[in-house]
Image (cartoon, helix red, strand yellow):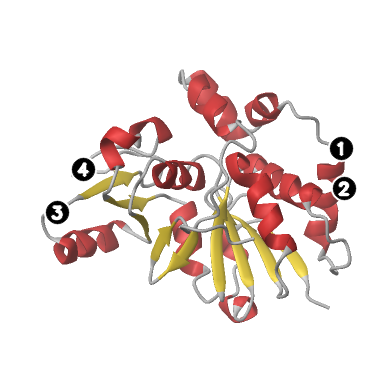
Amino acid sequence: MNLLRVWMRKEEIDPAKLAGGVAVVIDVLLATTTMLTALDAGARRVIPAGSPEAVRQLRRQLGRGKYLIGGEDQGLPVDGFDCGPFPDEFGADSVQGRDVVFLSTNGTRAVHAARSAEVLTVACLRNVPAVARFLDTVDAPVTLICSGSAGRVSWEDSLCAAAILARLNRTERPLNDAAVLLKDWGSRLTDQWLEHLMKGRVGRWFMEHGRKETLRFAARYGASETVPLLQDGSLTAPQTPIF
């Protein structure tokens, strides 16, 4: 029987254990929310970068062309980037038909660490139902990877993993202890997603810094039907349904 497990921080990632399975990387505030938004807005692909140096290398490889560089590092803006990490910076006017290079402290680094998985996707509250439907079709080990926050457990990533577990129809998979814990939490969640996000440390920071609308956007549960897939180092939106 194929295991379904949750890793609560990106530091738990074990590439050998991911081989042959499906990995779902979660960074609700904000990397996976923003990367999904860029794809939904018409970006050709999103390239998750593992470090500022990787961004510089990609810039040299891509040359001058139709690409946009965005994100943050350690929560701070990065010199030379076109925009920051917020989803409202990645609308259709900015990304339609373009490649997006994106860097974040936690989410994109988690994607890089998990690349040994046979299939890798990203999740946030906006695509929880779509990701759950996809996982119900999978006959392989599944790992939900909460990126966390600089080595700490993240409320909002754990919330998203709990929401995914609550949506799964297949119940026969053995679970690790973290998955058991979050599945139980998920079964008791209400649909007050904005209020849930506001409870966590990062959510409180957003509120204190005038970013309630960003939280509101991230809290729109099920707003997207996209299940991005990582292929050749880039996240793309499948042109046909994958489930």
Tell me, for residue 79, which label it has, or none.
4
Location of residue 222 (image quadrant): top right
What residue is shown at x 64% (from left), y 75% (from top)? 21
Which label's residue is closer to the chain start, 2 or 4?
4
Q: CA distance from mark 2 to mark 4?
A: 43 Å
Mark 1 highlights which residue?
188
User: Residue flagged by tag 3: what amino acid is it?
Assistant: Gly
Tell me whether circle 2 and circle 1 mark residues in contact (CB < 8 Å): yes
Q: Is residue 153 visible?
A: no
Image height check: is 25 above or below 232? above
Task: Choose between 178 and 74: the one closer to the eye.
Answer: 178
Q: Is residue 239 visible?
A: yes
**Sequence-wise, which precedes: disc 2 or disc 3?**
3
For the residues carrying marks 4 and 3, which lies nearer the camera in this image? Answer: 3
Q: What is the number of the mark on residue 65?
A: 3
**Foreground label between 2 and 3:** 3
- Residue at mark 4 to residue at mark 1: CA–CA distance: 43 Å
- Can you say which quadrant of the picture contains the N terminus? bottom right
The span from disc 4 to disc 3 (Cα, nearest Å) is 19 Å
Front disc: 4 or 1 = 1
Residue at mark 2 to residue at mark 3: CA–CA distance: 48 Å
Q: CA distance from mark 2 to mark 1?
A: 7 Å
In the rendered structure, which amino acid carries the disc numbered 2?
Answer: Asp
Determine whether label 1 and label 3 are within 8 Å by CB: no
State the SS at label 1. Answer: loop
Name the N-terminal-most of marks 4 and 3.
3
Q: Residues within 10 Å of mark 2 (few under 14, many from 20)?
A: few
Q: Which mark is residue 184?
A: 2
Discs 2, 3 touching: Cβ within 8 Å: no
Q: Mark 4, residues whose alpha carbon is within 10 Å: few (<14), some, or many (≥20)? A: few
Q: Earlier in the sequence, mark 4 or mark 1?
A: 4
Of the residues shown, which amino acid type is indicated by label 4? Asp
